[in-house]
Image: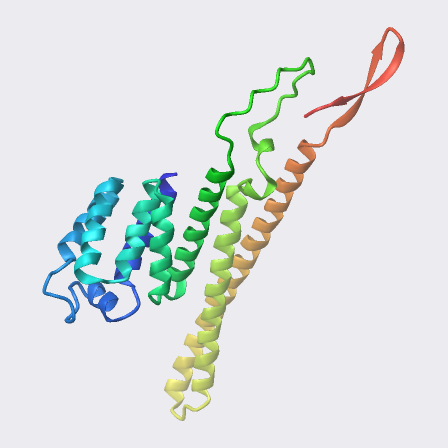
Amino acid sequence: MRIGRALVKTGVVLAVVCAPGDRGQAWAMGGPSESSPRGSGREALQAGLAAFEQEDYAVAIEHFERAYALDRDPAYLYAWAQAARLAGDCEAAVDLYRRFVDAGAEGAQREAALQNEARCREQLAAAQTSPTEPEPEPEPTAEPEVAVRPSDDLPRSRRRPDPLGLSLLVTGSVAAVAGSVVLGVGEGRRIGQARETDYDRFDSLDAQIDRFHIAGGVTLGVGVALAIGGVVRLLIVRRRSSLARVPWPSLSLHAGGIGWTLALP
């Protein structure tokens, strides 16, 4: 939850400093645009961001609203909408996201605004269709309960992959890319060497090229090995997790004879 809120806060700041148009560029340079009154909404903006950082969304909404009234900068609409959504006012947030998009938002900011708008609309629709009175809870039955591990009640797509396998895969991929880059640099030096007429310079470049090839080849090989190891570990861990959830039959003896039972892992 804290990581999600940190990403939301980062998105608010980026929407303000990276907004399309001259005003967003002026704020990114550290000051208001020439078309705005001198310092008109900057103090209100800074106060709103500070309140947003402290999760005081009611105060942040007041400051963002005042900053937008002074500067009419569309970037403030996104910050205002984020504060309204986190404060629980999805109706106001939907309107603000729509105004931000209609004002000409582009790129990742536009996509984020559309996604948050859709999320708020879903919450509003769910609130309208939910019953006013809670349904009575069904009476407990006499069926035996089956213990379920915490990971089993989550959808498969939400189960977190193995950390070690994922780390090996990422590290190996980065090393492989780095090794490929070093090899490419060595090949570039080889092309330049072919045009050299001075023997000493030619011999010096030859030594450099050998070092690039050795370093690049080793880095690429290690990276590929780590990446393959990471993939193998992820597959093995996933396979073990799938097998652990399969009920296995077991033989049991009782007074009436021999019977089969299912042993849950």
In the rendered image, the residue lying farthest to the left is 38
In the rendered image, the residue lying farthest to the top is 255
* Residue 202 can be seen, yes or no: yes
Looking at the figure, which quarter contains the N terminus? top left
Judge whether 5 appears above or below 42 on screen: above
Judge whether 132 appears above or below 71 on screen: above
Judge whether 4 appears above or below 228 on screen: above
Total of numbered circles in the picture?
A: 0
Q: Residue at x 55, y 54 (%)?
A: 227
Counting from the top left corner in percent of width and height, residue 196 is at 41, 90
Q: Nearer the viewer, residue 199 or 70?
A: 70
**Image quadrant where residue 104 sits:** bottom left
Counting from the top left corner in percent of width and height, residue 231 is at 59, 50
Looking at the figure, which quarter contains the C terminus? top right
Counting from the top left corner in percent of width and height, residue 219 is at 49, 61
Q: Nearer the viewer, residue 21 or 264?
A: 21
Q: Is residue 185 left or right of residue 84?
A: right
Q: Residue at x 29, y 53 (%)?
A: 79
**Image quadrant where residue 58 sits:** top left
In the rendered image, the residue lying farthest to the right is 257
* Residue 214 can be seen, yes or no: no
Q: How was this image coloured?
A: rainbow
Counting from the top left corner in percent of width and height, residue 242 is at 67, 37
Q: Residue at x 38, y 58 (%)?
A: 98
